[in-house]
Image: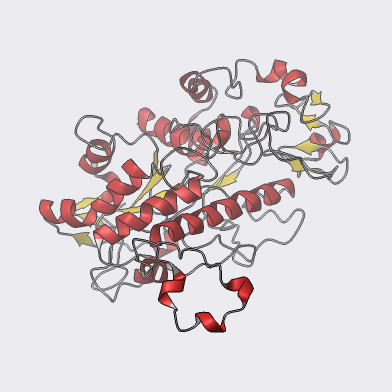
Amino acid sequence: MRHTIQCMVVAATLALIAAAGHRPDATAIQFTAVAAAAALSLAAAAGHRPDATWPYKPPDFPDACLGEYSFCNSTKSCVLDSQNASACAACGAGEYLCPDWRSCAKSAQRFSADCAASVSGTHLDATLSDAVRLAYIVAHTNLTDWISQLHNNAKAIPKLSIPSYNWLNDDVHGIQGPHGTAFPDGCGLGASWNKVAAPTALLLPLLLPLLLPRLLPLTLRRSAQELMHAVGKAIGSEARSAHNGYVHDGDRGGCNTAGGVASKDCNPNTAGENGAGITLYGPNINLVRDPRWGRSQETYGECPTLTSKLTVPFVRGAQGFFAANNSAVDSRGRLLAGSCCKHLAAYDVEGIPEERSSFSAFVTAQQMWDFYLQPFESCINEAQAMHVMTALNAINGVAASADAGLLDGLLRDPADGWNFSGFVVRRYLPASARPSRNPCG
């Protein structure tokens, strides 16, 4: 039990900050994302180092707080919790409150030097290995802390200077909320299946005489995979920028309205605000087997090969990888955002013929390998997605969220499985929506 809880907390939730996600000098600001290890995969995710090699000059914005720091309107200082009056009062204008909640860094550039005493030897010490930093978190937290993290809207752990974080970001075809671009849903993206780019001029020969001279040098039309990479990159970039803006204003997705008004779908009694984070619950790579499925429009269709081919560039784009290979655009390997392969596996039932949380899909081994698992293998092995979400349904009578053969064997096993090193989340479902008979967790 302790091992399970530790894995869930370290690899899934505390990962957000453990890797120095809230240190303003931890990483370069434009690609702040993920250390390769599962647990620290998100924390180093918040590119926060203004004194590092950064190809762009920060805007002349004296009130900007970098990293996971929020701005205090009263003192114009930067803290991890701008709703905490004593924290805001601890430092002066332009200063950063160190993780010890007592000393102050004169600026973001001075964070490492001025806050050295409170960072050295802790989970925020970037000179230590991931294993040592994770061990520090586990040693300095208890069961109550762990339980507080097992929600979408994870609570802050002030004693470790870990701010709250909302994992609910249903960014399948665009980030949630009024601040994002809405791209075509899965069925629309799935219809763009041309594998090789073609010269547009060859497709429209009759229209060329009508085009203005300045439009004649036409470029190649994008292939489906190039298009998916561009869509993923746009979503990852918008998720990152929106998160930076929300955090600066003190809004961490928990219906905190500081600095603005929470989105209309924000419910403090359930999951909080959808779309304020950088861990994306997308893409949905389940396959359509029944047109009555209420979520079929989210997916790319019924073909496992097509879904696999479109999933890889989407995930690479969203996480900040080059289109042609799986190397990060950021020279230090940090991710732009973290994608999720969902829902593992054999999920295409919403309420017909049975409620999804009590339905058991009976499939053969050949069906699993030839059909249901192919997109997940591509998403994990080729695209190297950060996390995986399990399905609500059971598979051959065993809940997908508790299937050891699926999660510990196929997913994690380094010899016979996919050797996945990221983290796993369960498909969330409000208590009020759970049926009384729910064998699926």
Residue 367 lies, with reference to residue 336, above or below; the image says below
Residue 417 spot, x, y in % from top left: 23, 36
Looking at the image, which residue is at 53% across and 57% down?
270
Residue 20 spot, x, y in % from top left: 61, 30
Looking at the image, which residue is at 62% across and 52% down?
254
Could you tell whether 230 is left or right of 301 in the image?
right
- Total labels drawn: 0
Residue 328 spot, x, y in % from top left: 49, 38
Q: Nearer the viewer, residue 207 or 21?
A: 207
Q: Nearer the viewer, residue 83 or 417?
A: 417
Q: Kindly indicate the quadrant of the structure image that contains residue 75.
A: top right
According to the image, what is the colour scheme of the structure?
secondary structure
Residue 382 lies, with reference to residue 191, above or below; the image says above
Could you tell whether 82 is left or right of 134 in the image?
right
Q: Quadrant of the N terminus?
A: top left
Q: Nearer the viewer, residue 389 or 360?
A: 389
Q: Kindly indicate the quadrant of the structure image that contains residue 407.
A: top left
**Visible in this render: residue 170?**
no
Could you tell whether 314 is left or right of 420 in the image?
right
Residue 31 spot, x, y in % from top left: 59, 40
Looking at the image, which residue is at 23% across and 40% down?
410
Could you tell whether 241 is left or right of 284 in the image?
right
**Visible in this render: residue 107?**
yes
